[in-house]
Image: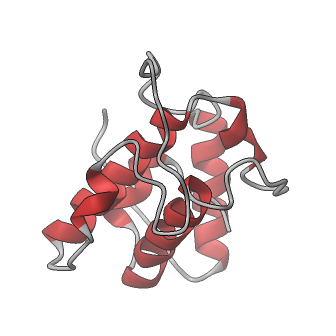
Amino acid sequence: MRLWHYQLIEYLPRQQLLGQHRECCALRGNGWGKKHAIVDYVFKHHPHILWNYHVRVMSEMKCRGYHVDKQWMDPCYRGKSCERYNLDRVSELYNYPEHNEGYLKECLINLAGKGIVINEMKSE
């Protein structure tokens, strides 16, 4: 699984959006720090950045009428089987530096390979 470029979240079809939520929950929980070829970069950064990303995913889910456990909105929450984070600071980064223009193009190509074509995106 991958974390799609943050600018794609609002355009993701249902399956990919819900997959992002599951991936974020796993990474925030027992998956934190476990080697993963595609999302290993996440562990190089403060966990708060993953929470920021996850909030974007959950916000889009809410816009589409899905219900999300409110506990995930807490930046220290890691799931029912994990100890909470003790975050003494928050990250100054809001997005992963790896989510650059090159990664956006890579994600668009990957989605197109799945038959998902995103023609127009809002610019940020």
- To which quarter of the image does residue 92 belong? top left
Residue drawn at (40%, 52%), measured in percent from left and top?
Answer: 77
Q: Is residue 45 left or right of residue 4?
A: right
Q: Is residue 92 left or right of residue 46?
A: left
Above-or-below relation of 48 to 93: below
Question: Does residue 120 appear in the picture of this structure?
Answer: no
Above-or-below relation of 54 to 64: above
Above-or-below relation of 30 to 124: below
Q: Is residue 28 left or right of residue 41?
A: left
Question: Does residue 39 appear in the picture of this structure?
Answer: yes
Q: Is residue 71 left or right of residue 35?
A: left
**Nearer to the camera, 118 or 107:** 107
Residue drawn at (44%, 68%), measured in percent from left and top?
Answer: 21
> What sort of colour scheme is used for the picture?
secondary structure
x, y percentage for residue 52? 38, 40
The quadrant of the picture occupied by the N terminus is bottom right
Residue drawn at (46%, 21%), measured in percent from left and top?
Answer: 91
- To which quarter of the image does residue 114 belong? bottom right
- How many dots with numbers? 0
The quadrant of the picture occupied by the C terminus is top left
Above-or-below relation of 43 to 35: above
x, y percentage for residue 115? 57, 83
x, y percentage for residue 9? 38, 58
**Nearer to the camera, 92 or 17:** 92
x, y percentage for residue 98? 65, 33
